[in-house]
């Protein structure tokens, strides 16, 4: 047994799924952790697993109160929180204050917090302790063997937490840009580029994670739409679709989400023997980060329609009872079953559509981060952000290396779509994308994300949109004024639409 009087390097509050795995990951990298959770069972489970994985040698110390937790730590204290976003974060912070946490101690929130809460907390706890945040992606496996980490806030706190985060983060092979994957307790990956970089001032890390989740929502929805076309238009079984996804995962569509989708589709239900996906109810849940991303895009006036569509797709999925009833009342098109040649053609179309739409989703996400950075005065490094998403996180994909390259070529890129590599990729693959959307629409299969991405692309490449008519409409009913194509920008005009000679007034 280790010396129980030996002080711990890190205090940890919250031993739920993510917390437990982060604690074990920290322990694997040589950190001695003092852990606390209100639920003793959760705490016991960490202690038991730690002992099992480390030949009976404890690397984690269970604490029964916040006071005990602080007393077990080296000073200045470093306390990591893995508690549900929202009120629980403030509850724990106030308990730590009661327990005697001090001004130069650091508390790191790793939950999926709303970024504005993080900004508020950093100010609110000033003088009591240093509130720092690190958004974590990667689910439970990521937390255990290497997550992607998005820290932001007080630069001094970063100097203290940086070696810890770089140690436990996922690693990328710098030669290939691919994740170095190893899932062995006690034998972590210690070489490679860590997926942990300082994002910027308070709140920016959680903003970036929020956009990560918005992209995650859209990426998942795109894969689901492709699945539905294969299932309902092509009549393919779950295992057939799984085989196609597995094959796609070997190429440009390689990603964690593609990989797990193939696995979900290949899994059988132990009760019925049916493909498990066929017995899962088609009602999607959500915890809010996709919604926050869509709201932020609307507030900033920065288009992210595919992310918003992905949130709506989850909402409409929850109207199960109405949909079941409407399916017997509302007519759709009648289509013949495709022959084998058409089936293969549609599968190829869907592949290219998924690739192009995915580029648009990332273009929307990066544009949103760029717009928010300008709005909030953050200096975001987009190449670095793409780099830390290459491994560990849920949206990890080979494709992230091409995004890194694009921002390394030009860190002021107005939009990913105009990067020469991505512009060429879409130009080469767009016809199949258009056919996929058209075919699905003619068959009556909803492809809201695939088609919204296509409209985003077409809108972005259209020199003259119909907003001229829209401005005319606004001026007609509300005297909202418009600019003219033949006059200087910033000069606004109003027309007396009802008068026969339509006199025009320059407003400003
Ligand atoms: C991650 C995930 C993780 C979680 C989200 C999404 O990056 O590890 O994004 O944060 O899965 O909370 O959850 P919902 O789909 O329930 O909104």
Image (tube, rainbow, N blue to C red):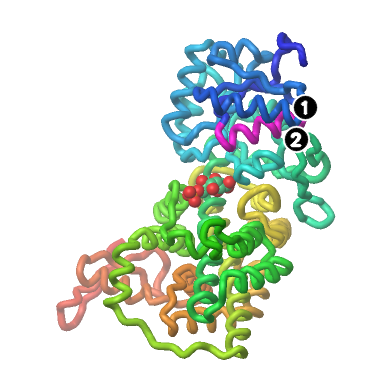
Residue bearing mark 2? 167
* SS for dot 1: loop
Q: Is residue 175 above or below residue 27?
A: below
Q: Residue 288 placed where, x, y %? A: 43, 47
> Do the residues bearing badges 2 and 1 touch, measured as CB atoms within 8 Å?
yes
Q: Nearer the viewer, residue 66 or 293?
A: 66
Quadrant of residue 474 in the image? bottom left
Question: Which part of the image, by quadrant, shows the N terminus?
Answer: top right
Residue 301 visible in this rendered orientation of the protein: no
The dominant secondary structure in magenta is helix
Q: Residue at x 42, y 76 (%)?
A: 465
Quadrant of residue 158 in the image? top right
Q: Which mark is residue 426?
A: none
Q: Which mark is residue 30?
A: 1
Q: Residue 258 placed where, x, y %? A: 63, 62
Q: Residues within 10 Å of mark 2 (few under 14, many from 20)?
A: many
Q: Residue at x 49, y 40 (%)?
A: 115
Where does the magenta region start and end?
16-30
Q: Nearer the viewer, residue 401 or 231?
A: 231
Q: Residue 37 placed where, x, y %? A: 54, 24
Looking at the image, is mark 2 or mark 1 earlier in the sequence?
Answer: 1
Horizontal side, residue 261 vs residue 309: left or right: right
Classify mark 1 as within 8 Å of ligand 1 or not, answering yes or no. Answer: no
Residue 343 visible in this rendered orientation of the protein: yes
Horizontal side, residue 245 vs residue 293: left or right: right
Q: Nearer the viewer, residue 203 or 39?
A: 39
Q: Residue 42 placed where, x, y %? A: 56, 28
Is 22 covered by the magenta stretch? yes
Question: Which part of the image, by quadrant, shows the C terminus?
Answer: bottom left
Q: Residue at x 72, y 26 (%)?
A: 51
């Amino acid at each position: 047994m280790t010396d129980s009087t030996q002080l711990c390097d890190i205090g940890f509050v919250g031993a739920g799924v993510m917390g437990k795995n982060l604690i074990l990951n920290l322990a694997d990298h040589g950190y001695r952790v003092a852990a606390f959770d209100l639920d003793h069972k959760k705490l016991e489970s960490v202690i038991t697993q730690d002992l099992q994985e480390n030949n009976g040698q404890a690397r984690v110390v269970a604490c029964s109160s916040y006071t005990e937790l602080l007393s077990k730590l080296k000073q200045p204290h470093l306390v990591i929180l893995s508690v549900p976003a929202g009120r629980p974060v403030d509850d724990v912070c106030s308990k730590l204050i009661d327990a005697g946490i001090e001004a130069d101690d650091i508390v790191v929130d790793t939950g999926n917090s709303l970024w504005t809460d993080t900004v508020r907390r950093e100010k609110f706890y000033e003088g009591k302790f240093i509130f720092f945040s690190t958004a974590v992606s990667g689910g439970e496996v990521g937390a255990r063997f290497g997550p992607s980490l998005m820290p932001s806030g007080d630069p001094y706190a970063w100097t203290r937490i940086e070696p810890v985060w770089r140690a436990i983060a996922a690693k990328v092979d710098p030669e290939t840009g691919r994740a170095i994957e190893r899932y062995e307790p006690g034998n972590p990956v210690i070489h490679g580029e860590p997926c942990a970089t300082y994002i910027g001032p308070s709140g920016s890390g959680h903003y970036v994670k929020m956009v990560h989740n918005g992209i995650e929502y859209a990426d998942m929805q795109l894969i689901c739409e492709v699945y539905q076309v294969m299932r309902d238009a092509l009549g393919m079984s779950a295992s057939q679709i799984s085989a196609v996804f597995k094959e796609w995962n070997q190429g440009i569509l390689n990603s964690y989400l593609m990989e797990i989708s193939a696995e979900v589709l290949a899994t059988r239900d132990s009760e019925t023997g049916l493909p498990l996906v066929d017995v899962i109810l088609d009602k999607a849940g959500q915890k809010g980060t996709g919604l926050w991303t869509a709201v932020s895009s609307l507030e900033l006036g920065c288009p992210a329609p595919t992310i918003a569509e992905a949130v709506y797709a989850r909402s409409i999925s929850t109207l199960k009872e109405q949909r079941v009833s409407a399916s017997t009342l509302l007519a759709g098109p009648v289509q013949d079953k495709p022959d084998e040649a058409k089936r293969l053609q549609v599968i190829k179309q869907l592949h290219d559509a998924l690739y192009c739409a995915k580029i648009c989703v990332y273009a929307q996400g990066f544009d949103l981060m760029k717009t928010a950075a300008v709005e909030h005065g953050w200096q975001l490094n987009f190449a670095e952000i793409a780099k830390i998403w290459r491994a560990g996180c849920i949206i990890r994909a080979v494709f992230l290396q091409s995004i890194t390259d694009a921002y390394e070529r030009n860190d002021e890129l107005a939009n990913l779509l105009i990067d020469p590599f991505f512009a060429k990729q879409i130009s080469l693959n767009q016809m199949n994308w258009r056919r996929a959307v058209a075919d699905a629409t003619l068959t009556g299969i909803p492809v809201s994300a695939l088609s919204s991405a296509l409209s985003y692309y077409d809108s972005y490449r259209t020199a003259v949109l119909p907003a001229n008519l829209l401005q005319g409409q606004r001026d007609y009913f509300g005297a909202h004024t418009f600019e003219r194509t033949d006059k200087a920008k910033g000069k606004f005009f109003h027309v007396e639409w009802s008068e026969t000679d339509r006199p025009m007034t320059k407003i400003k």
